[in-house]
Amino acid sequence: MRILVVGAGAIGGYFGARLLEAGRDVTFLVRERRAERLRQCGLKVKSPEGDLAFQCPPMMLAKDIDRPYDLILLSCKAYDLQSAIDSFAPAVGPDTVILPLLNGMGHLDALDARFDPANVLGGQCVIAATLDAEGEILHLSNLHAMTIGESAGGRSTRIDAIAAQLGGAGFDLSVSEDILQSMWDKWVFLATLPTGTCLLRAPIGDILEAPGGEALLARLFDECCGIARDNAHPPGEPVVVRARAFFSERGSPMTASMLRDLENGAPIEVDHIVGDLLSRRRTPVEGLSALAVAYAHLKAYEARA
């Protein structure tokens, strides 16, 4: 199976490197600037699960795509989605399967509008990774999991064949028969974490020490769960219990990558993760919406930038 990994940043570079190490047929689709860095320094991953280094990783520019690929692994930032779609479109044939690992749900709408919806899978990943100043990938914890599934639900020979290619490659892989529910569960959690930590500019543990901090996190989570219910994807009890425990853990150093981006003056995925979620609300909340306040706060940051 010929796999095209769109980008060689923290997420795509990490999973692509693991697949490459496992002997899979992987090519990275990169921009000229990243290509030049990879030519000079190679693709390097520093990880508690084992470091990787490829002096000359297989890569190409969009203009050099000359035939379709079997599987396209997409993990760009949401604000780069349209340019990413334009770049890999020449690699999409009638049987090409696209596996996005973005957060939220809006990217599925964009992909379905451009390509055959039957060939767009659902997917998500759980990993803490970033690029350092030298362009090396830093894997920050032992978590490196990917979940994939047919967007229509159920199990198929196609998803099993893809799982066989992605499995056994040095990261945790699972197949969900209800991937959209898995994606909504993650979205509810991820919308709560950045809105809370960005609004108060602090990790979970510090927020819990602030007057009203715990109640604010609970309010944000409840609003996110309400929107999921509005869209027929309410999180199950185990998901709710884990999330409530996470958002009430005293001393927790956990924060969101969006807060790190905000503090660095970088672009943020506010519309994809928070704005799109708010647009799907069907049941009004009583009083002032904490989620709407957090969204306004993040949009003000964008306007100021």
Image (tube, grey):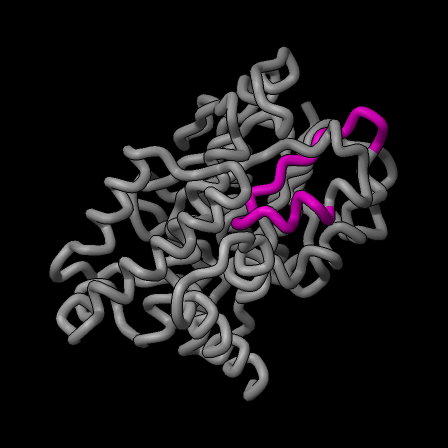
Task: Determine if the magenta segment contains residue 242.
Answer: no
| Percent position of residue 40, x then y | 59, 60
Q: Nearer the viewer, residue 153 or 139?
A: 153
Q: Residue at x 54, y 21 (%)?
A: 163
Looking at the image, residue 157 lies above or below residue 193:
above
Which quarter of the figure has residue 264? bottom left
| Percent position of residue 239, x then y | 32, 38
Task: Determine if the magenta segment contains residue 107.
Answer: yes
Which residue occupies the extreme bottom position in the image?
A: 304
Q: Nearer the viewer, residue 221 or 256?
A: 221
Name the image quarter holding the N terminus: top right
Q: Nearer the viewer, residue 86 or 156?
A: 156
Q: Which residues are magenta?
A: 93-110
Residue 55 makes an appearance in the image: no
Residue 191 makes an appearance in the image: yes
Q: Residue at x 51, y 61 (%)?
A: 274
- The number of numbered badges drawn on the structure is 0
Which residue occupies the extreme top position in the image?
A: 157
Q: Residue at x 63, y 44 (%)?
A: 74
Judged left or right of residue 291, residue 103 is right
| Percent position of residue 267, x then y | 55, 72
Name the image quarter holding the C terminus: bottom right
Looking at the image, residue 133 lies above or below residue 175:
below
Q: Residue at x 30, y 48 (%)?
A: 141
Judged left or right of residue 110, residue 292 is left
| Percent position of residue 93, x then y | 84, 31
